Image (cartoon, grey):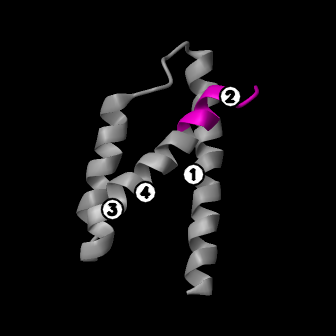
Amino acid sequence: IDWLDTQIACLLNERMKAADQVGKIKRTVKQDVPDQSREMSVLNQVERIIQHPILKANISNIYREIIQESRTCLLYTSD
């Protein structure tokens, strides 16, 4: 479990780095940061992947928090 937790933390870190880059690009091209259709697509994809019944019931809430943190990166990353 410790190894898996480390992997999850590393992947979340990579996701935030990617959000930093996307934020820079969106600001350069003057594109709105929040993208509801993209966020729904991500939630739907994650929900399809998860198989554990308890996690499946809660993954949307967990991922909404991850998306919210990513959105914060998109909005406030410096150039």
Along the polypeptide, which appears first: circle 1 or circle 3?
A: 1
Give the structural element (helix, strand or loop) at label 4. Answer: helix
Closest to the observer, 2 or 7 = 2
Residue reaching furthest right? Answer: 78
Residue 54 image position (x, y, % from top left) = 29, 73
Residue behind mark 4: 62
Label 4 crowd (10 A; few <14 / some 14-19 / many >=20): few
Give, as a three-letter code, the residue at label 2.
Tyr
Q: Residue 58 carries which label?
A: 3
- Mark 3 and mark 4 residues within 8 Å of each other at the beta carbon: yes
Q: Residue 15 carries which label?
A: 1
- Mark 1 and mark 2 residues within 8 Å of each other at the beta carbon: no
Q: Start and end of the magenta stretch?
A: 71-79
Residue behind mark 2: 76
* Mark 2 or 3, closer to the camera: 3
Residue 54 shown left or right of residue 64 in the figure: left
Residue drawn where x is 26% and y is 50% of the image: 44
Look at the picture and state if 6 lies above or below 46. Answer: below
On whether residue 64 falls in the magenta region, the answer is no
Residue 17 shown left or right of residue 32 in the figure: right
Look at the picture and state if 57 lies above or below 70. Answer: below
Residue drawn where x is 62% and y is 85% of the image: 2
Q: How far apart are marks 2 and 3 (CA)?
A: 28 Å
Along the polypeptide, which appears first: circle 2 or circle 3?
A: 3
Give the structural element (helix, strand or loop) at label 3. Answer: helix
* Mark 1 or 3, closer to the camera: 3
Residue 78 image position (x, y, % from top left) = 76, 28
- Mark 1 and mark 4 residues within 8 Å of each other at the beta carbon: no
Residue reaching furthest top? Answer: 30
Instruction: Examine the image and state in which quarter residue 52 appears.
Output: bottom left
Give, as a three-letter code, the residue at label 1.
Arg
